[in-house]
Image (tube, rainbow, N blue to C red):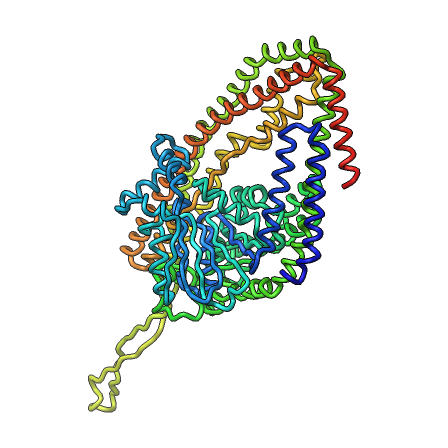
Amino acid sequence: MAVFAAADDTAFQAFTDQAEAVIANISAHAREEDLDSLRELLANFRRKTEDFYRENRRLNIGVVGQVKAGKSSFLNTLLFNGQDVLPKASTPKTATLTKMEYAEENSIAIEYYSPEDWEVIAENAAIDLEGEVYASARELVSMVRRNGIEPRAYLEKGSERIGFASYTDLIEHLNDYVGEDGQYTPLVKAVTLYLNKEEFKGLSIVDTPGLNDPIASRTLRTKEFLELCDVVFFLSQSGSFLDKSDWVLLSSQLPQKGVKKLVLIASKYDSGIRDVLRVQDDDDIFGEDENTADNIPKACKLIRRKLKKRAKQKVEEFIKDLTARGSSPELIEVIGNCAEPIMVSALAYNMSGKPIADFSSEELNIYSALKQFSEDMDADLRLLGNFDTIKQQFAAIAEEKDNILRQKALSFVPNAQGELKELLEAFLDKTCKRLQLLEQNDRGQLEAQKKAVESQMNAVKADIGSLFGELSTRLETEKLTGIKAIREAGKEYQSVKERTGTVTRTGSYTVSDSKWYNPFSWGRRRVKYYTYQEQYSYCLAADAVENLNKYALEASSKLEEVFSEALQLKGLKRRVLNVVIGNFDLGSEKYDSSLFKIMVEENVNRLEFPVFSVNIEDSLSVITGRFSGELTSASDKNELSVALAKALTRVYEELAQKLEASVKQFKSDLSAMGQTLEDSLLGNILAEFDALLKQCADKDREIAAYQAYAGALRKELAQL
């Protein structure tokens, strides 16, 4: 950092002085909440720069994605040659922020929840509600009881450090603290691994639990780290690439102000290509189509084209939105680089070059499902793995460390100045709206408006309640339609296709070697052999796998439609806005609508809707674990059909249960949304009226104060 510290110190101090001067210059006229926003901006700037310039500041690299995106497997393959050093977390409840850094001595630093954190978790666990926060808290408390540990000793300890001599030793210890069934896992907030590995020098690599973590303190910790992050590897499963949950995480929740490089990864590539692999046979009158392939290289090309097309489309939409919002060119460039995702499969990469005898059960299942589509399995596994590309990317990032940090140093002040300008412009806009309202209305007019608003509030509440009630009813109707649709869809995939093949058989018959002229040959016989082609029928285990895959995809898609059809999210905010504006009749001459429209929009735009998603990956291994290749006997065919039917039923039941739970939770959320909208929107409007009415007591002085504040803001903006 010493290379550019001196010049930056001067620039940072100059901005700090500038922001403090703005606060001092407007403090005589500004609202307290405006001053608080400016102080928060300045405090955040100081926190980031102090972290940036602390001694031995590392390049912060975050690995981000939803649960089951494969973050731990990705890092194990990238950093530990495929060894399962970092345990996999199958649920957000057991996901922990795990940081890896260089040190001369190998050790694990464990940070436990504070007593205050645990008190909140215990309180949430005692609340009998279905929300994820409460369910997660109950699970953590239950795990502590089940593991037979007394939490207070660890909570009060706060942290501890444990040394380890080998990866085996590390894995054993780490599983106790961050493994899904680890004894101390429910009490652990974060873990740092200090490793004596040269490639870790100057880097801080974090496997994040995600920003949708139900444990609030852990989510906050993740966000705090990402605020200081320099590089982000964002993982999205190939089979559901950049779905709604991913896109919300990437475009809305991930802080981008400090990120200098964003690498988009399509993980679990092997799963993605299995969705399009299909055995071609002579009876297939349609032959190949653009959505299927009969070998792995062709499937890779097909999926790569589809994933790149989707990434390009989503990134273009995002950049258009960022441009409209006046975002910095730097941020737009960072997002633009995501248009070229990298497809990887940690599992396939780890399988390549490994003897089949050493495969795990999961790897054997993958091998069984893929081998019939490959002429060179090892080469195809390397193609699917594609980790050499990631390793090159990672090495280049480590090599560019100083340059990335230098770019970040240069962007601190411009970004902060942009934020300062946006805040001051927002303050000025609202001040002018309030000034206009006071200038154009006297106390009597404002009281008449307030009275009219109060008289119409019941109508607003009724209409909001009616709207959200309608959505809840429609959701129930769509739920039944969705369950029926996935039940019917399952019937289409129950039959395994009967195929025909030919096999060369050998037959024989006896001929006489007797010659009439040779009595000694009389009675001689010999056998003559011949070959012939015999047809037989068989079933492929791969066809059952394909049926299960297709059903899982189709059923998941149909359930996504339940929410999209019922809620029609794009139109919902507009409908809520229309309900409020229609009832308040803000177009009437009785109202000065400019300020109230802003307030309505602000409140409506705070509405966030949960995203329905389901992961059925475990169900897809039901068939591959028991069957492979051609099945010719009637008993084998029957067993395959029975196994497929059971697997389809399990998928259906799991999806139906998850839909039922999601609908129940969302209906509760809808009710809370409606109440929150009523309370915040109507409360804010009345509070605004009350403030304006108080100001009417000395209208000339208040107008002068607003004019002075507007003048001060314009003066500061002119100097930026």
Residue 65, percent from left and from top: 50, 49
Residue at x 58%, y 47% (from the top left corner): 47
Residue for point 57% across, 14% down = 457
Question: Image check: 703 left or right of 576?
Answer: right
Q: 277 or 364: nearer the eye? A: 364
Q: Position of residue 551 (x, y in %)?
A: 43, 45
Q: From the viewer's side, name the closer residue of 422 and 562.
A: 422
Report if residue 487 is visible in the image. Answer: no
Q: Give the quarter of the figure containing the N terminus.
A: bottom right
Above or below residue 28? Residue 643 is: below
Residue depicted at x 70% and y 37%: 422
Q: Quadrant of residue 162?
A: bottom left
For the C terminus, give its image quadrant: top right
Residue 401 in the image: x percent, y percent?
61, 62
Nearer to me, 324 or 1: 1
Residue 38 rendering spot, x and y as whole percentages: 65, 37
In the displayed structure, 363 sits above or below 118; it is below
Labels in figure, total: 0
Q: Does the rendering let one see residue 718?
A: yes
Q: Is residue 391 left or right of residue 627?
A: right
Determine the residue positioned at 35% across, 40% down. Answer: 653
